[in-house]
Amino acid sequence: MDKKTLTLWVLRGLISGLFLLSAVLKLIPLWAFEKQIVDLGLTDWCSAHYLARLIIALEFAIGIGILQKHFLKRLVIPVTVLLLVAFCIHLCIVGAQSGFTNGNCGCFGQLLPMTPLEAIIKNVVTIAMAIYVFVKIDKDDRVSNRLIVPFAIYGFAAFAMFFFYPFCPCWGESTDPVPVVDAYNDPALGDTLQVDSADMVLPTLPSSNAADTAQTNPVNAAQEPAPVVSKFAAFNVFGNKKVNLDKGKKIVCCFAPGCDHCQETAKVLAELAKKEALPPIYILFMDEEAERIPEFLSSSGIKASYTVLDIVKFWTTMKSDGTPAVYYLHNGNVKYQCEGIDANAFNKDSFLKAIREN
């Protein structure tokens, strides 16, 4: 093998490795890449399932296709360069809006964070390698080359993505939270659901003067915030128990079972619960890797009731910077909230301050 051939194979191997690594890391976890697509405004949650899998399949196909000979110069390399150019344009827009050295562009998923600037440099270097291969490699043999080969590679990659990462389509479904079910007045649910004692409403004697009621307990009247309807009002069944999250004091957590940061936050809450008189904790779990929920609860030690939401409903309810998210509610009023792992990440001191002040 001469030097030119060796160089071309090394460059093709590097390009292949970068695309395959990018595709694999986007799968860990896949929902994070789907959320990124939605956050960019490219599509809604229902379509994000399809678009995410097709993009990852394309990266797999390029990673494999760059190593074969069929339509390498007329199709595979041009598609590779165009895709990288599109990524660079997107990264420039993101960098101009949020800063070129801030955040994670998601190019290598969540396990290998990369700033927009780092990703642009990586893409420019990859484009240079692809152009060099394009210029130096021999022309496609129009007789022996088969166009069906690169398309078959992409078709197989797309099939594998949808086969190994299935999802529930949401055609025609609303992405709004489910309506509140009134278990107190619903005979079908009244016999099966227990009512959280903290949410029970005791009968009170009517008063002819509302002012007299406030004067009987002026401290409580001043401290109790007016009830409001929070974004969590729709979720009122946790572990076969009827719960009103907008009544009294509640801690609501939004966790992904496979999220390490979520588990660390849950551990902190479990430790605090042993030392502080915390309000009851309720968890909204995303159904990605739902089979890991028992392990999550066991390893973190948190004592909480939970319910599981599909990915679409989970994110359309949160509309936040990401997981883990913790909210302290008082009559539906948000007195403390943390979201994600960046500037608004969970802070134990701020959380305790909010709890003690209320």
Image: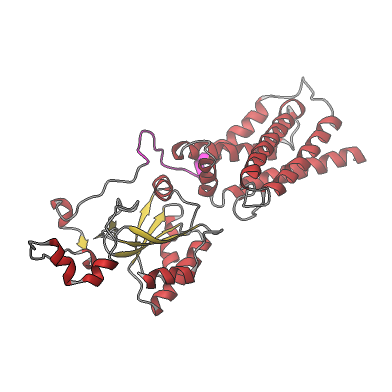
Left or right: 344, with 128 as reference point: left
Query: Is the residue 78 above or below the residue 215 in the image?
Result: above
Q: Quadrant of the N terminus?
A: top right
Taking the image as drawn, is residue 300 in sight? no
In the displayed orientation, state which residue is furthest to the bottom.
Answer: 275
Q: In the rendered structure, which segment of residues is drawn in magenta?
A: 162-175
Q: Position of residue 267 (x, y in %)?
A: 46, 70
- In the rendered structure, does residue 167 fall within the stretch colored magenta? yes
Left or right: 235, with 111 as reference point: left
Left or right: 289, with 107 as reference point: left
In the displayed orientation, state which residue is furthest to the top.
Answer: 143
Residue at (20% x, 62% y) in the render: 194
Taking the image as drawn, is residue 220 in sight? yes
Query: Is the residue 227 above or below the residue 177 in the image?
Result: below
Q: Position of residue 223 (x, y in %)?
A: 29, 67
Query: Is the residue 158 above or below the residue 139 in the image?
Result: below
Q: Nearer the viewer, residue 341 or 106?
A: 341
Residue at (47% x, 68% y) in the render: 350
Residue at (75% x, 45% y) in the render: 121
Magenta segment main secondary structure: loop
Residue at (74% x, 32% y) in the render: 77
| Number of numbered discs visible in the structure rendering | 0
Left or right: 319, with 61 as reference point: left
Q: Nearer the viewer, residue 246 or 267?
A: 246
